[in-house]
Image (tube, rainbow, N blue to C red):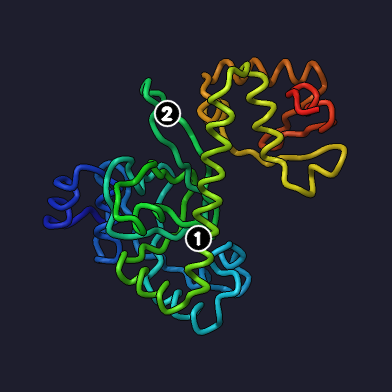
């Protein structure tokens, strides 16, 4: 991978953050890496396959074929490496990012300076949606957990598209409502005087989808480290490791690699005080 040319390097260094460089220079043709690797054009041609996962997201629901084609043409998809900072908390962005593939960790700082994870974006999710629609600074930091494919759409182009397709406005409203609910759930988890084991039990139950909650047991794919799980519930890595070991001894949860197995949802709900 080539290093940034002189002008691109100057823009990157003067921007003050990787996220701002990416937001303002995606699609300019500049490639390279100084601290975190900026996105570079994706050489593959499969991002817009009919079966692509991002098409199943809330935004694409009921979007007419003409609108879908137009949305695909709004920006060229770019790639980024793991750990790339895409958006920075407290900074404005001129583009909304649409995740085509990969995972992006969304986090914010608490008043005590502790990093708090509020969610992990999946294909079909927007990054910086509220900031672009409102014109206010980003409320979260977005960092790639895996190599990602992303579309960086200029704010005005995105707003114009929404006006041309009212169903897209409705879908954006639904997605922002989901983000709001997720934030409320996070505050509910942290805002009450709950013990750390209870918080973790509630988090695991929250990660079970509706179909799983109807069954006796559940399997959760979790690629998060113990430290990242701790950032969800406001505790350290060692605390999460100790709690999971206690859950295993109680036969509540078993971890096999990146899979968490809940042998009895009812027992975990009782433990968390939900029954």
Which quarter shows the N terminus?
bottom left
| Residue 193, position as x, y percentages in the image | 58, 17
44 or 164, nearer to the observer: 164
219 or 273, nearer to the observer: 273
Q: Would residue 132 be found to the left or right of residue 238 on screen?
A: left
Q: Would residue 60 be found to the left or right of residue 201 on screen?
A: left
The disc, 2 or 1, on the residue closer to the chain's N-terminal end is 2
Q: Are marks 2 and 1 in contact (CB under 8 Å)?
A: no
Which quarter shows the C terminus?
top right
Q: Is residue 162 above or below residue 18?
A: below
109 or 193, nearer to the observer: 193
Give the residue at mark 1: 173
Residue drawn 57% across the image and 29% down it = 229
Under tag 1, what secondary structure?
helix
Q: Which mark is residue 113?
A: none
| Residue 201, position as x, y percentages in the image | 69, 26
Residue drawn 53% across the image and 20% down it = 235
- Count how many numbered circles sit on residues in the image: 2
Label 1: few (<14), some (14–19) or many (≥20) C-alpha neighbours in 10 Å: some
Query: In which quadrant of the rendered view does residue 49 lie?
Result: bottom right
53 or 79, nearer to the observer: 53
Q: Is residue 263 above or below residue 2?
A: above
Q: Mark 2 or 1, which is nearer the eye?
A: 1
Residue drawn 55% across the image and 43% down it = 182
Give the residue at mark 2: 115
| Residue 111, position as x, y percentages in the image | 37, 24
Label 2: few (<14), some (14–19) or many (≥20) C-alpha neighbours in 10 Å: some
Under tag 2, what secondary structure?
strand
Q: Is residue 73 above or below residue 226?
A: below
Q: Would residue 54 be found to the left or right of residue 30 on screen?
A: right
């Amino acid at each position: 991978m080539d290093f940034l040319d002189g002008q691109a390097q100057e823009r990157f260094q003067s921007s003050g953050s990787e996220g701002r460089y990416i937001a303002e220079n995606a699609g300019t043709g500049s490639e390279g890496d100084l601290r975190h690797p900026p996105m570079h054009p994706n050489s593959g041609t499969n991002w817009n396959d009919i079966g692509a996962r991002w098409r199943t997201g809330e935004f694409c629901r009921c979007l007419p074929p003409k609108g879908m084609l137009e949305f695909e043409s709004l920006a060229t998809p770019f790639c980024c490496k793991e750990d790339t900072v895409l958006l920075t908390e407290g900074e404005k962005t001129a583009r909304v990012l649409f995740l085509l593939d990969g995972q992006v960790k969304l986090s914010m700082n608490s008043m005590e300076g502790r990093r708090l994870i509020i969610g992990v974006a999946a294909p079909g999710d927007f990054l910086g949606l509220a900031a672009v629609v409102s014109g206010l600074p980003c409320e979260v930091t977005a960092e790639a957990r895996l190599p990602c494919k992303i579309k960086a759409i200029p704010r005005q182009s995105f707003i114009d598209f929404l006006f041309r397709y009212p169903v897209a406005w409705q879908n954006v409203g639904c997605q922002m409502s989901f983000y709001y609910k997720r934030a409320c759930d996070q505050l509910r988890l942290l805002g009450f005087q709950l013990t750390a084991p209870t918080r973790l039990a509630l988090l695991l139950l929250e990660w079970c989808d509706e179909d799983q909650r109807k069954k006796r047991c559940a399997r959760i794919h979790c690629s998060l480290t113990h430290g990242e799980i701790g950032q969800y519930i406001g505790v350290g890595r060692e605390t999460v490791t100790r709690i999971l070991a206690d859950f295993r001894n109680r036969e509540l949860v078993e971890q096999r690699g990146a899979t968490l197995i809940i042998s009895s949802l009812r027992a975990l709900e009782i433990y968390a005080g939900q029954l």
